[in-house]
Image (spheres, rainbow, N blue to C red):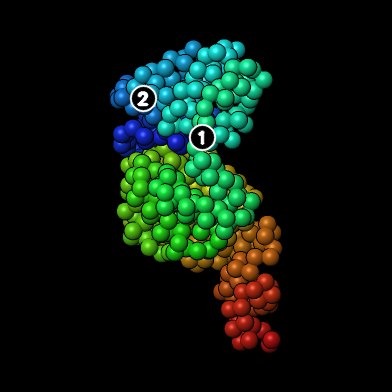
């Protein structure tokens, strides 16, 4: 949705450092939005504004909540206040509101403000917005696009590069983006797009170099910062990733997808308690997310807290029984506590859901061997070997008359 894209563009264009803790009304409000509970979100974002009236992010998101609830009078009030403090920051949403209220002239005026601003979205997104599409047959719409070229040749080149990358034409996309980078055009965004392409094509070094340039070019580009953490972690540069993770915690407490990445980096750098706290905070905001419990379990497991890991995996499985990884992970934790019978049951459940998983067959083989089930263990190791776990050969050679 266009309003979601606009959120990314405008977020943190104004100074706003908020705590990463669940006690922040802003964070609770934003999580309410993610859960579709706009009423709760409005209450908490209003509290955030009481505490900090200059928080334009909270004001923007509260306006968006009102918009999603079709309370257009309240939404207009917030976006007009936003515009008074930051010119044109709320103009696109005001245009969409006026379209819904059948006020064509006002909608066109606000859209003109948006197109003249630094918050301007790509042309394609403007043209495909379901609200703004209702203006297409209006004379005022046609006149607006004839007034001037709202998008420069560099703007169009950037969008062309993004399109080419999406269709797999990476070489042409890279050439265009490198040309734009040399021109100094939107360096942070351009290098972020380059990094994404390089990462997808397996060039980790180039991806990391490009994303570091993106971060250096605009310290407010928290999306690029998140990518930098991801790429550093992929290169096992966890200490550097941790420094960026700390920064992202401060700058983007509502980047909820990043909690998983940040917690993983904290765990890998020996900051176990911080990693647990990060996931606990996430689970206070999103208590019905089984993947979050699974990650918390993996963090406990990685730090040899096996009983805690079992407890977290139990919760993940309670919430969703269809993921073989949850049963596999709990099976490993049971194995570490030498509760082999339960481990065997979990590996069997995992294999029911994913019967071709070599790793699970291998672990089940080890458990059957520990239980003295030699025949079953030989079968398990044969299956592991068949599916590509070649380490199983050692057991087969020594115990199974292979």
Q: Nearer the viewer, residue 26 or 372?
A: 26
| Residue 182, image x, y percentages | 42, 52
The quarter of the picture where the C terminus appears is bottom right
Q: Is 207 placed above or below 130 here?
A: below
Q: SS at mark 1?
A: loop
Q: Is 78 placed above or below 382 here?
A: above
Q: Nearer the viewer, residue 270 or 224?
A: 224
| Residue 367, image x, y percentages | 58, 70
Q: Residue at x 61, y 63 (%)?
A: 347
| Residue 99, image x, y percentages | 58, 17
Q: SS at mark 2?
A: loop
Number of callouts: 2
Mark positioned earlier in the residue sequence (1 or 2): 2
Q: Which mark is residue 151?
A: 1
Does residue 117 appear left or right of residue 370 in this picture?
left
Q: Residue at x 38, y 23 (%)?
A: 87
The answer to whether mark 1 and mark 2 are in CB contact below 8 A is: no
Q: Is 247 placed above or below 392 here?
A: above
Does residue 313 appear left or right of residue 182 in this picture?
right
Q: Residue at x 61, y 66 (%)?
A: 360
| Residue 155, image x, y percentages | 50, 40
Residue 151 visible at all? yes
Residue 37 visible at all? no
Q: Residue at x 38, y 63 (%)?
A: 237
Q: Which mark is residue 86?
A: 2
Q: Nearer the viewer, residue 373 or 5?
A: 5
The quarter of the picture where the N terminus appears is top right
* Residue 284 picture quarter: top left
């Amino acid at each position: 949705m266009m309003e979601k894209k606009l959120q990314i563009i405008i977020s943190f264009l104004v100074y706003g450092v908020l705590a990463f803790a669940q006690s922040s009304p802003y964070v609770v409000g934003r999580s309410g939005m993610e859960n579709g509970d706009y009423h709760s979100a409005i209450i908490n974002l209003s509290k955030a504004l009481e505490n900090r009236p200059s928080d334009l992010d909270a004001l923007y998101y509260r306006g968006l909540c009102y918009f999603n609830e079709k309370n257009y009078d309240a939404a207009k009030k917030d976006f007009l206040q936003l515009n008074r403090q930051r010119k044109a920051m709320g103009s696109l949403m005001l245009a969409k509101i006026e379209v819904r209220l059948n006020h064509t002239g006002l909608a066109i005026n606000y859209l003109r403000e948006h197109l003249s601003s630094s918050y301007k979205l790509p042309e394609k997104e403007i043209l495909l917005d379901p609200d703004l599409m209702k203006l297409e047959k209006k004379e005022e719409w046609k006149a607006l696009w004839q007034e001037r070229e709202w998008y420069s040749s560099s703007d169009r080149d950037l969008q062309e590069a993004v399109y080419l990358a999406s269709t797999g034409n990476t070489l042409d996309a890279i050439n265009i983006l490198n040309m734009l980078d040399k021109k100094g055009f939107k360096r942070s965004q351009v290098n972020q797009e380059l990094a994404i392409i390089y990462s997808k094509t397996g060039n980790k070094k180039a991806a990391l170099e490009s994303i570091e340039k993106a971060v250096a070019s605009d310290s407010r580009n928290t999306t690029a910062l998140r990518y930098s953490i991801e790429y550093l972690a992929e290169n096992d540069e966890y200490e550097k990733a941790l420094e960026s993770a700390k920064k992202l915690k401060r700058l983007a407490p509502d980047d909820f997808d990043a909690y998983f990445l940040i917690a993983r980096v904290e765990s890998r750098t020996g900051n176990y308690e911080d990693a647990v706290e990060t996931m606990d905070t996430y689970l206070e905001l999103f208590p019905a997310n089984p993947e979050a419990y699974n990650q918390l379990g993996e963090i406990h497991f990685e730090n040899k807290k096996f009983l805690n890991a079992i407890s977290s995996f139990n919760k993940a499985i309670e919430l969703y029984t269809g993921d073989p990884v949850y049963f596999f992970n709990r099976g490993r934790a049971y194995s570490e506590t030498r509760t082999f019978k339960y481990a065997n049951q979990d590996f069997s459940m995992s294999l029911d859901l994913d019967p071709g998983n070599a790793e699970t067959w291998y672990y089940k083989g080890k458990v059957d061997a520990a239980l003295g089930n030699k025949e079953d263990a030989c079968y398990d190791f044969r299956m592991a070997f068949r599916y590509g776990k070649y380490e199983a050969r050692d057991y087969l050679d020594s115990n199974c008359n292979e």
